[in-house]
Amino acid sequence: EDARRLAAERDDFALVRRLVELLDAADPAVAAVACSDVGEFARFYPNGKAVLKHLGAKAKVMALIDHDDPDVQRHALQCVSKILLKNFATN
């Protein structure tokens, strides 16, 4: 439900765009939390992975894997795995 509220398509994904901007934050804690939130959006929002790719989040998160801060690296790697993961579960 939070992912749906965050998306708010009628606002052209304004909050998601803000999250993508926060990936460039100078504060490592902010960047790490933004990675975590972006990953959860990709995981729970229908078509979230495509939205994030369109907004440039995937490339930004991939770059954060080489960040100096190990916490940012860990969250970025987890985020990338959520963006790239395909769910093969059958109903």
Image: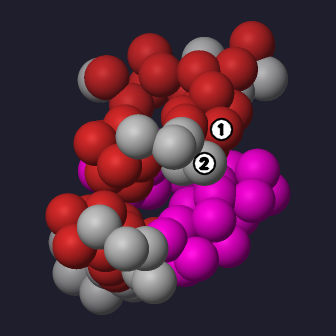
Would residue 23 appear left or right of 88 to someone viewing this image? right
- Tell me the residue at 64%/58% (across/down): 57
Q: Nearer the viewer, mark 2 or mark 1?
A: 2
CB of mark 2 within 8 Å of CB of mark 1? yes
Few, some or many residues within 10 Å of mark 1 (<14, 14–19, 20+): some
Q: Does 9 sit above or below residue 44?
A: above
Would residue 67 appear left or right of 43 to someone viewing this image? right
Q: Quadrant of residue 20?
A: top right
Callout 1, which amino acid? Answer: Glu
Q: Does 46 sit above or below residue 75?
A: above
In percent of width and height, residue 7 lies at 56, 26
Q: Is residue 8 visible?
A: yes
Q: Main secondary structure of the magenta part?
A: helix
* In magenta stretch: residue 54: yes
User: What's the mark number on residue 24?
Assistant: 2
Q: Is residue 40 visible?
A: no
- Tell me the residue at 30%/87% (across/down): 88
The part of the chain drawn in magenta is: 36-64
Identify the residue position indicated by label 1 in the image: 21
In percent of width and height, residue 45 lies at 44, 44
Disc 2, SS: loop
Callout 2, which amino acid? Answer: Asp
In percent of width and height, residue 39 lies at 37, 56
Few, some or many residues within 10 Å of mark 2 (<14, 14–19, 20+): some
- Tell me the residue at 65%/38% (across/down): 21
- Tell me the residue at 56%/62% (across/down): 49
Disc 1, SS: helix
Q: Quadrant of residue 82?
A: bottom left
